[in-house]
Structure formats: C-alpha cells, structure tokens
Amino acid sequence: MRRGYERRLDKSFRNAPVVPFSPHSRLVLFSDCHRGVGNSNDNFLKNQHLYFAALKHYYAQGYTYIELGDGDELWENRNIHAIREIHSNVFWLLSCFQKQGRLYMIYGNHDYELRESRDFPYHAGIILKGCGFFDPASPASCPCLEFYLTHGNQVDLLNSTLWKLSRFLVRYVWKPLEQIGILDPTSAARNYRIKEKSEKRLNHWAEKNQRCLITGHTHRPVLGSLETHYFNTGSCVHPRCITCIEIADRSVLLVKWSMESRNSVLYVGRTVLEELKL
C-alpha cells in the first residue's frame, strides 16, 4: 500500500509534460528563489545580483530554464504584481526565455496559486526524457535517461494538502516574528528534523520507483547519481551564494554562483561543486 506522500508525488507526474533532451541540449534547473516585494522579509533580495548574472549567462549560452517551484513568495505577500514590479529585470529575462520556447515552470507550496497563471506555463511536475546517450565504448551505458522534476513539498502534509493553513501561519505568525529573528520551525528549509524527514521520503520514493528525482524545497543541494536517484537544486536564498543544477555536454553539474575577487576586483563567479557524467 502506497503512503500518502507517495500518492501525492505520483499525482504530480500523472499528467506531467515530457520535455525531450539530447546530449547536445543545455538545461539549467533553479528552485526556491522566493522572490518578494523588496522589504526586509524578501530573502531573495540579497542574492538578486547573483541570480540575474547567472540568468544572463544561461540565456546567452542557449540554455533552457526550468524553475522547480517557490520562485515567488506568495505566502508572505498577497500580490504577484508587486513582486514582478520590484524584480522587473528578472521577469523581463524570463519572458525572453519564454519567447524562445526555453522556459518551464513548476509551482511549489509558496507559489501554489500560480498553477493557473496565464503569464507562464506552470506544472506540478515535468519529466525530462533524454535519448541518444548510448556510448559504444561503454556497454553498460543507458540509451535513454529520465529525470522526474517536481518541487518536493508533496512529502509534507502541511506543505501540500494543508498548504492554506501553512500560508495563514506564515503570513500572520511567522512573518512578523522573522523580523525579530525568530524563524519558522515548520519550514523544511529551516528545521533540521523536518529537512531530514523530507529528504528521507524523497529518497524513498526515488529508490522505490527507480526514478531519478530532482527537487528543491529543502534548500539543501544534492547531486545524486543514476544509482542513488535523488537530486536537489538547493536554493537562491543561501547566505552568500545561489545553487542550481545544469544538464549539458553529457554531464549533470551542481553549480554555485557567488561573489569572488581577483586583483581587488569583485565579480560574480560560477563554480562547479560536483559533476556526474551521463
């Protein structure tokens, strides 16, 4: 018998669009930007320059952009238009990706209301299907690869089925308390016990179904393998960096963008943290 969180994850992929990719494709996966309205609760604000620099790089290099949920902070803020006005440069660039057919969006618990948005195409999950990866020199290589993409909040009842209750608590209880330094103890990103439980469940679903699962939600970046199955993009609200996953040139890369210096000059730098060859 499948558990509740397993059924919720299954549902995310029941009618998920299939996005094909090949060894020549370039994909970048971000999650948990939590774009806000530019006030003290806007956790994205401190890293917006890193994110915009990264997006410009990926746009120029021909990448397809895939966002795995919680892109916009709609639990603390009621109005998506205010978020888009504050971060207009970001949404302008996202619209450029969209015009070229290089944009896919997944909704998470903090932006669940966008599932019916007419501005961008939002989905509960996406299936990446890769073909042409067979290597004659390696008989064990797999000609077809599949990655299952979703936000990951499905493993937590409060952040999935009861998301309206969680939104109420965040908006009217934890948001004011955050301003005096008290963090939300129910958040998978901030509560270590909940983070561990969520990752254990995501791992369990991936192992049981023998599917490579890529999520966000916990904010902890993980580069799995074709054997261990579980991957996580991390987030864009780390204290000093943002992280993402790239799929390009027969590799899956866990990448960090941060401020670096050379000869007393500051610049936005890209660092590969881990690499998985396909």
Image: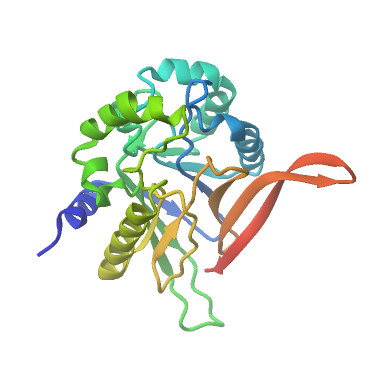
Is 168 placed above or below 228 here? above
- 66 with respect to 253 (left or right): left
Counting from the top left corner in percent of width and height, residue 6 is at 20, 57
Is residue 108 or residue 58 the one in the foreground? Answer: 108
- The quadrant holding residue 75 is top left
Of residue 212 and residue 45, the one placed in the foreground of this image is 45
Nearest the viewer among 95 and 85 is: 85
Tally the numbered discs: 0
Give the percent coordinates (x, y) of residue 3. 15, 59
Residue 240 is situated, as x and y percent measured from the top left of the image, at 63, 44
Q: Is residue 126 left or right of residue 235?
A: left
Please state which of residues 206 and 197 is positioned toward the viewer in this rendering: 197
Residue at 62%, 33% (x, y): give it.
52
In which quadrant of the rendered view does residue 212 lie?
bottom left
The residue located at (62%, 60%) in the rendering is 273
Tell me what residue is drawn at x 43 percent, y 73 percent.
142
Q: In which quarter of the image is the N terminus?
A: bottom left
Position of 109 relative to 40 (above/below):
below
Residue 264 lies left or right of residue 204; in this view the side is right
Q: What is the x, y in percent for residue 213?
A: 37, 59
Left/right placement of residue 137 relative to residue 266 reads left
